Image (cartoon, grey):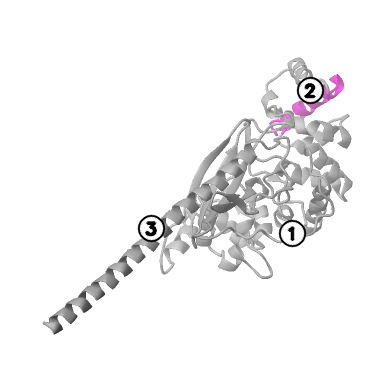
Amino acid sequence: MLILAVFAVVLLTVLAVGIAAAVRVELLASRSSVARVRSLYLAQAGLNQARAMLVYDEQAIDALTDNWGPDARTPLHEPHRMADGWYEARVYDACGRIDINQADLTTLSRLTGDEAVAAAVIDWRDEDDSTVTPDGAEASYYESLPYPYRPRNGPFQTTGELLLVRGVTPEMFFGTAAGRGIVDLVTVDSQSLNTDGNGNQKTSLAEFRNWGEQAFVNSMMAKLGSVLTLYEANQIFLGLSALEGSGQGGYTSLAQLMTVAGLDPAKVAQLIDYFCVETDRIVLGKVNLNTAPVEVIAALPGSSEGLAQDIVARRDQEPFRSLGDVVAFFMEQPGGPGLFGQMIDRVTTKSSTFLVEAMGRTDTGRGFRTLTALMRRTQDNVLVIRQAEEDWPLTPLPARQPRTARR
């Protein structure tokens, strides 16, 4: 009997220890699950805070010193306390990057340093599979790989898709100790509003191809009589007629304003923020000179690393308030008219598309949750276009040179 009693006690002890261990595991799992849920809501709070900052941000221009930017007086990416945890968020201007769905061969070649890679990027997004390489040649390469796949033959959906493109190496994509990778320099979506500094739709010179001179002049004076003289309006129409007569179909570039009689560079700088050559309210692929890194600005046709450094130094003193400021800056540089002609249709000072990362973590939990979102700002709202959860912490902010001055 004594042996049976001892055996029973040992058995019960083992069962008790086992149950206690199981309960402890379940309790820890429950706490971890609660912490992860709280971390997710903290990350969502970070996204909401970033969205609110974009809603109430001044829309005349967008610069790194804005409340959402890394150079703000109270940066959003610093940890923010909330309840029993904290969150941090980072906002990246998509218009401060090269849009790989819009960029041409020259821009992509300058960005990647490899024309063959640039051609492969364009072929990947090309629907007819024949813009750069012969039809079928691109597809046959991907189908011959050990793990074959077909090119998208459509717009890139994510920047990570670049790693599938012929010639794009992990070092080119992610970067090395010697330099930043293109993952931090590109986007698949960048839109900006085609509006002037007052938020009004710009006057499209493409709308007047079939107008008579008097109707054109009346329209110009009604819209821009405060900055445009009657003589200048007549000359702009004559320039339009000359371009149509030469078979160009009218104004196709803002640089053509410089050829209008009576419009000197100072006058063009005064007028250019009110004009455009597109007919849509939204424009694609333009680079914001107030937010783009040096590598992106240097990749634009007509630019150089030296010019990009000068642009960054100029905006650090005071952001470009309009395209007129950009024109005035270009004209101060060597070969100013040439820079103006090559770059003015590719740049902007305003943005509408933003990439947001937010991370949340509780005080007691060891885990974190990270959310990413693509947000698009309209004139009166900020829309979340896409949102997803990631499995890694926030991307480290790139090292920046000391600022010479702050706004």
Residue receiving disc 1: 400
User: What's under tag 2, amino acid-wise?
Assistant: Leu
Residue receiving disc 3: 30
Q: Is residue 19 left or right of residue 3?
A: right
Asked if residue 330 lies in the magenta stretch, the reply is no
Q: Residue at left 58%, top 39%?
A: 376
Depth order, front residue of 20/144: 20
**Magenta stretch, residue numbers:** 227-251
Q: Earlier in the sequence, mark 1 or mark 2?
A: 2
Q: CA distance from mark 1 to mark 2?
A: 41 Å
* Furthest-bottom residue in this view: 3
Depth order, front residue of 77/372: 77
Residue receiving disc 2: 224
Disc 1 vs disc 2: which is toward the camera?
1
Q: Residue at left 49%, top 48%?
A: 41
Percent from the top left, x then y, of residue 142?
46, 62
User: What's under tag 1, amino acid-wise?
Assistant: Arg
Look at the numbered discs 1 and 2 and tell me whether their residues touch, using CB distance below 8 Å: no
Look at the numbered discs 1 and 3 and tell me whether their residues touch, using CB distance below 8 Å: no
Percent from the top left, x then y, of residue 172?
61, 65
